[in-house]
Amino acid sequence: MQRITPQEKDFPQWYQDVVKEAELAESSQVRGCGIVKPYGFAIWENIKDELNRRIKADGVENLYFPLFLPMSNLQAEAEHVEGFSPELAVVTVAGGEELQEPLAVRPTSEAVMYPTFAKWINSYRDLPLRVNQWANVVRWEKRPRPFLRWSEFLWQEGHSAFADKNEALEEMWRMLDMYREVYEWMAIPTLWGKKSESEKFAGAEITTTTEVMAKDGKAIQGATSHHLADNFAKAFDIKYLGEDGKWHFVYQNSWGMSWRTLGALIMAHGDNKGLKLPPNVAPTQVVVVPIKNTAEVSKFASDISKALAEFRVKVDNRENKSPGHKFYDWEIKGVPIRIEVGENEVADMVCTVYRRDTQEKTSVPAQHINDYVSDLLKEIQDNMFRSAKEFQQQNIVQISSIDEIEKHPGKFFLASWSEEPESEKLLKEKYSMVSRVLPKEYEDKKPTNKTCFITGEPAKHDWIFAKSY
Amino acid sequence: MQRITPQEKDFPQWYQDVVKEAELAESSQVRGCGIVKPYGFAIWENIKDELNRRIKADGVENLYFPLFLPMSNLQAEAEHVEGFSPELAVVTVAGGEELQEPLAVRPTSEAVMYPTFAKWINSYRDLPLRVNQWANVVRWEKRPRPFLRWSEFLWQEGHSAFADKNEALEEMWRMLDMYREVYEWMAIPTLWGKKSESEKFAGAEITTTTEVMAKDGKAIQGATSHHLADNFAKAFDIKYLGEDGKWHFVYQNSWGMSWRTLGALIMAHGDNKGLKLPPNVAPTQVVVVPIKNTAEVSKFASDISKALAEFRVKVDNRENKSPGHKFYDWEIKGVPIRIEVGENEVADMVCTVYRRDTQEKTSVPAQHINDYVSDLLKEIQDNMFRSAKEFQQQNIVQISSIDEIEKHPGKFFLASWSEEPESEKLLKEKYSMVSRVLPKEYEDKKPTNKTCFITGEPAKHDWIFAKSY
C-alpha cells in the first residue's frame, strides 16, 4: 500500500508522488502544461479568495487585459525583453491567416497594460492607478515541475502607478506584507526582503520576495513585489500633468502571486504520509468515516456531520472502500481532522478524533464535538505554523566561508556578503546556489562579519543563501 | 454634453457609446481583443459569483485544463474541427524553437479535456463526472464587437459524462434552467429551448439556448447547453465498465456562459441615458451625491452612506466635478439609486431619492432611508424584469408567411416551420435571419399553422426567428 516515496529517500520523487496520490494535478498532452484536478483546484480557490479579499480591501480594482501582445511591445523595455524572450510562446497564424506581426502570449502583463496606462493617465488626479488581474500566463519551461514550474500558470498580477516614488515604495512593501500574511494564513513562515541585482525581475529597480523553506532545505520564491521606478514609464511614455503644471513620468510597481503557492504548501508542510493541510486552506477540514455499514453507525455519522455544519465537513460513505483505505486516502489528502465512528462510538456516544498534524487520537463525547473541533482546528492551524517556524529556524546555518556549505547539505545559510554580482556567479557555479533574500530586518544592520564569505572583500549585509526550486 | 447616440438613430453606435462612456471596456492594440475596465469587470464578477455559486450547488467541481492543445486533437471529432478550424489562433514557436506539432489556443475545451476523461473514467463508479472551468478562450473574429464578439473572451465551460443518456439529457436541461435563472436574476427574460440542426454546436446532438431580446429587436445567444451524445466518447474512446460487466461509451454534455452576458445586459436594459443596471448586478447600488461642499452636507452624506452600509453604496466626493456632471456620470453607469443631499435636505432631514429605472424623484425622511432603499432596490429589480418581459412579449410577431418579415422591422417572429435546413438557408439569404430557438413550451405542441411559413411544406413546430448579434 506504500504509494509515496519517503522524503529522505528522494524528495523530488516524494513531491511527484504526493501531487499524484493526493489527486492535486497531472501532466497534460502538451509538454510542460499541467492539469489541476478538482482537489488541487479547490485549495487554489481558497488561497485565491483570501488573497482577492485582501487585494480589494487595499483599494485595488480588478480588470482584464488581453492574452496576446504585439512582439514589438516587449522590445520597448530593454531588460524586460531580454529577460522574457527565451520563454515566449508565439502565435503566428490566426483565423486561417499568417499574422503580419506575430503575437506573444503574455509572460506577464507590463508590456500589455502600460501602453493603455499611458492613455488613462493624464493628470495628477488620475493617480494613483491601482489595478489587478487574475489570469493565465505562459513562460515556456525546459524543466517543468507541477505547480512550481509549468509552462502555463494561473496567478494574479497587480500593477500600479504613482506620482510619488516614496508612495510607490511604500505600496511595494505593503503588498509584500500582504503576501507574507497570506503565507502565514497558510501556516507558512517566510523570509522576506530584497532580492540581489542579478535575481531581480527583468525591468525592475527593486524586487522584494517572500521565500519559503521546503522540507528538503531548498527555497521556493513564494511571491514577489517589484518597484519598476520610471523604467516602464519612460519606455511607454506614461506621464501626468502635475499640480505644478509640468509633465512628469509616473513611478510604478507590479506584484504577483501564483499557484506556486500550492507547491510551497506541499513542500513546507507535507510528510511521509502525504499532504498536510492547515485548516484555513483545507477544502475538507473534517472527514467523518463510518467504520461499519449499519443503519445506526450511518445515522450517527450523519448527525455528527450536521453538528459540524459550520465547518467544511464531509462524510465518506463510499461503499467499495474499506475504512483502512479511507483513512489512508484522507491522510494523503492532508485533511486536518478525521472522525471515526463505529459501533463502539455509537454505544458510548463518543467520536474518535484523529488529528493529521500530530497523528494523535482522542475520544470526545459526541455532545461536545462542535466545540472540540472548533478549538482543535485553531490549535492545528497554530501548531502547524509553530512547527514550520521551528523547522525554518533550525535549518538556517550561519557561515563565514563558502567552504562551510559542503558540510551542511539541505540547509539555508546566513552569511555576510559583498553583494558583488561576480561573487554570486562563483557561488552558482560551485554550489548551484544564489542569494535568496536580504531579510528586511538586516537591511539597516551591519553585517555579522566584516568580510564577504565568498571573496573576502568588505561585506555589506547578512543575506540568506540556498538552493532553490 | 450629449455623449451617447440615441438608440433610435443608430443602435450599434449607441452600444459602442455606452461601452465607452460607462467605462466598461475599450479596444486593445491587438485587433479583436478587448480590455475590460474595472467597472465592467466588477459587473462580470457579480455575475460570475452568482453563476459559480449555482454551479457548485449543483454538485459540479471546478478544475483547470491547459490553454493549448495539439492540433491533431481537434481533428478527432469531424464536425468539431470543421466548426472551429477557421477561428483558431495557432502557436508555432515556443521557448525559441519551432514546435514539431503546432498548438492551438483553445476555442473551447472538449478536445483538451476528453482525452484525459478517457483516463479518468474506467468504471460505472467513476460516473457521473461533472466538472467546470473558468477560463479564457480564443476564436478569431473578423467583425469584433465588445463583449458579444471578441477574439478572446472569458467564460465558464462545464463538461460532464454519464452512463445513462437520459440522465445526461436531464442535466442538459437543468443547466439551461440555471442559465435562464441567472438571466432572470439579471432581470432579463429569455426564450429558451432547442436550436435547429444548422445552428447547433459543432459536434453536439442537441444544442439548447437562452435567447435574449435586445432593445433593437435583435437576438443575443445568451448561453448554451449541449448534449454531445457519444460523439466525442467515440472520438476520444471514453468508455466505462458497467455493472453488467461490459464496456460502454459515455454520454456527454457541455454547457457555457461567457461575458457576452454583459452585452445582453447592456442591450436588454439600456436607454438613451446609458446603462441601466438591475440592483442584483450593480457594482454600486446606491450613490450618494453631495450637492454642496459644506461640512454639514458632507457629514450628512457620510451618515446616510453609513445607514446604507448593508448595500453596495458609494459617496461621490470628487472635488473637481459639478453635481450635474456627477448625476450624468452615474446615470450613464446605470446605478439604480441616486441620493442627492444638499443644504435643504440637511435642514429638513430628508434625502432626495432618484431611481434610474423610472427616472422618478422622491423625498424620503433620513431616519427611514435604510428601509426605503431596501424596498426600492427590490422594486427596481422587479420592475426592470417586468418591463423587459413586457418589451419581449410586445415585440414578438406571429407570421404565417416569409413576406410579412419586411413589414415588421426590428421584431422577433413566431412562425410554424418545416425545420428543413434548406428553408433556413433561404431565409438567411433573403433576410439575414435564422431560427433562434424552438421554445420548450412549444416542443410538444402542434404548430399554429399546418404549413411552413417559408416553403409551404408541412410545418413541425412554432419557432422563434430573429436577426442576431
Image (cartoon, coloured by chain):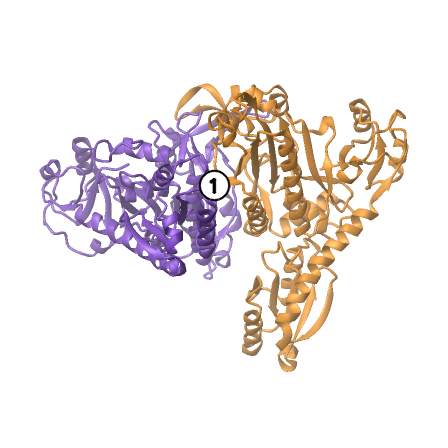
Chain colours: A purple, B orange
Q: Is residue A385 above or below residue B129?
A: below
Mark 1 packing: few (<14 Cα in 10 Å), some, or many (20+)? many
User: Does the rendering let one see residue B146?
Assistant: no
Residue B51: image location, x then y, percent: 58, 46
Q: Mark 1 points at which residue?
A: A135
Q: In this view, does A123 lie above or below B267?
A: below
Along the line of sight, the residue nearer the viewer: A235 or B259:
B259
- Amino acid carrying mark 1 in the image: Ala
Residue A172: image location, x then y, percent: 36, 53
Along the line of sight, the residue nearer the viewer: B178 or B453:
B178
Q: Which residue lies furthest to the bottom in this view?
A: B347
User: Does the rendering let one see residue A349?
Assistant: yes
Q: Residue at x 54, y 40 (%)?
A: B60
Mark 1 belongs to chain: A
Q: In this view, does B337 lie above or below A456?
A: below
Q: Which residue is drawn at 51% across and 40% down?
A: B61
Quadrant where the C terminus of chain B sits is: top right
Along the line of sight, the residue nearer the viewer: A242 or B161:
B161
Give the SS element for disc 1.
strand
Residue B419: image location, x then y, percent: 80, 27
Specify the quadrant of the image occupied by residue B323.
bottom right
Q: Residue at x 66, y 55 (%)?
A: B277
Q: Is residue A124 above or below residue B134?
A: below
Quadrant where the N terminus of chain B sits is: bottom right
In this picture, residue A364 sits left or right of residue B101: left
In this picture, residue B8 sits left or right of residue A211: right
